[in-house]
Every structure is written in structure tokens, then in C-alpha cells.
Image (spheres, grey):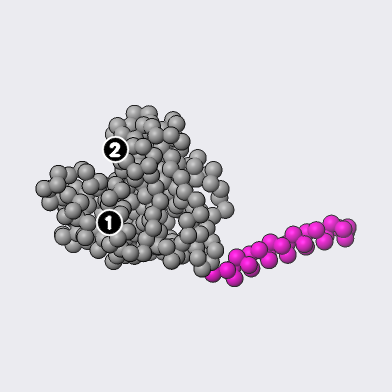
Amino acid sequence: MTPRRRVWPVLAGLLLVFGLCAAAAARPSFGVKAMTYNLRCASCDAPDSPQHWSQRRLLVAALIRRHRPDVLAVQEAERAQLDDLVDLLGEYAWTGVGRDDGEDRGEITAILYRERRFALESAATRWLSETPERVSRGWDAALPRTLGMAALRDADSGRRLRVFNAHFDHQGERARLESSRLVLREIAAAGASSPVLLLGDFNFTATSEGYAVLAAALRDAEAAALSPPQGGSETLNGFGRFDGRGPKIDFVFVDALARVRSHRIDGGEASQRDASDHHPIIVEVDWP
């Protein structure tokens, strides 16, 4: 016969587990609509080019407004572009720093969020290099690259969301691989108690080693989606010149507890292809 003094701790443990499960089941799910979008930098094109930001800003704003994400991760954003979007959209704040000086100069891996939905708790930027806490270029990268990070607090539920926005190098294969490893270290350092979103332009495809590193620790939202992914597989569109045959180099990754309700690449109509040389990805994700 099992001694009584051993039975009670077991029963108490079972009651605790059942109680935690019941509490989790009773708590409403935490849902977020998120979007990643490489805007193409304002200085990438001559002022008289039809692809200059002055000719695209309204198209970009209209696209974002149509989806109205709670969280928006943008790549190649310059300060003037972010100021334009804040003015045009009217409900977003943002966090991030320029990659060239840690302030305003250069491209920003900015994280925008709806101010009525979220409050910014903390933010930081890491350079994708051997010296991530200072302005630097890493490994065989052609350019400085950054990871934007933000902890957002939901106004209604009090839940915290950790958002990571990455832009990997377009040339350095080793830099992309090492950047994947660095990103995972930063996510681990942030702690696993909160929902995690990793979004960005990774400049690799799903067959690369850098992708495999991330997918071993996180889940590709497209593969994890509970409904069939929409919009094809092209995210790099070259302002429409790839005609739907461009590669997918932009991704959204989620943690193990996330429930991805939908994944969509918005290729839009022909006129929308003038907005940027990338298509955005929009996901709807729930957490228990």
C-alpha cells in the first residue's frame, strides 16, 4: 500500500496542473495582425524617377491602411519615410534607429504599432555583426545590417508581445547564416514567457542554411498556417518586372505556442506593384 504521505503531494501536483490548464483555457486568446514590408529606401532612386518615394508614398500608405496591421515591421525605411507614414496613417508610433549612426542616419528596421492597441515597454537595436551593440558591419556583409527589437504591452489584456524585425545582407552568405544565429540568441535573451514575432527581409530563400537555422527554433508562419496561404510565393517583385516569378525572401516566424490563422502575400493589382520592389506579408496570429 502506498503511504498516505506520498499520495497527497501527488494529488496536490495534479490539482495544480489541472488548475493551470483551466486558467489558460479560461483566458481569452491574444490575437495580433502583423505585417512585414520592405519599403525600398527613399534615397535608392533619383528624385525624377517614377520609383522615387515621393511618387510611391501614397500607394504605400493606402496598402498599409487597407490591412491596418496592429504591428508593422518595415525594412529600408529612412527617417523621412517613417515621418510620412505616421502623418498619412494617423494611428501609429514607431521605434528604431538608423543603421549608419545609431540615431537617424541610414536605413531603419523600424517597428510601427497602433498606439491605441499597444504601449512601448522597451526597445533596442542590434547590429548583425560580431559587435552587435555598436554600429558595425559583420562578417562578409556588404552593408551594415540591423535587428530592431520591441516589447509591446497590449492595452486591453496586459499581455506582452516581443517583436523582432530583421534585414539581412543581400550579398554575404556567411553574414546571413551568422545573423540567423545572432537573432536566435537575442530572442532567447529576451525570455520565452511572451509571444514572439520575428519578421523581416532575410535575403535568403527557404532552401538556405540561414533559413534552416531559424526554422529549427521557430516556425515559418506560412508553413504553420491553419488555412491555405494566399498570394503565391513571390515577395521580391522588382517593381513588377519579375511578373510573379520572383523569390520569396521575406518571412514571418512565430514561437511554438502561436496559432497562425492566416498568411497572405499581397501582390495586389498592377498599380500596387509601383509601391515597392517587395510585396508585404500579412499574418493573423493567436496565442493562448
Compared with 22, 256 (above or below) is: above
Which residue, as the protein is rendered here, is positioned at the far left? 48
Please tell me how crowded label 2 is: few (under 14), some (14-19), or many (20+) other residues with Cα within 10 Å: some
Residue under the point 39% across and 58% down: 93
Residue under the point 32% across and 41% down: 105
Q: Is residue 254 left or right of residue 232?
A: right
Q: Which amino acid does label 1 sit on?
A: Asp
The spot of residue 76 in percent (x, y) is 29, 46
Q: Is residue 247 left or right of residue 255?
A: left
- Measured Cα–Cα span from mark 2 to mark 1: 26 Å
Q: Main secondary structure of the magenta part?
A: helix
What secondary structure is found at the residue carrying circle 1?
Answer: helix
Please tell me how crowded label 1 is: few (under 14), some (14-19), or many (20+) other residues with Cα within 10 Å: some
Q: Does the magenta stretch include residue 172?
A: no
Q: Is residue 9 magenta?
A: yes
The spot of residue 286 in percent (x, y) is 47, 63
Residue behind mark 2: 170
Q: Of label 2 and label 1, which has the lower sequence position? A: 1
What secondary structure is found at the residue carrying circle 2?
Answer: loop
Q: Mark number for residue 84?
A: 1
In front: 269, or 69? 69
Name the quadrant containing residue 204.
top left
Q: Look at the image and give the residue range highlighted in magenta.
A: 1-28
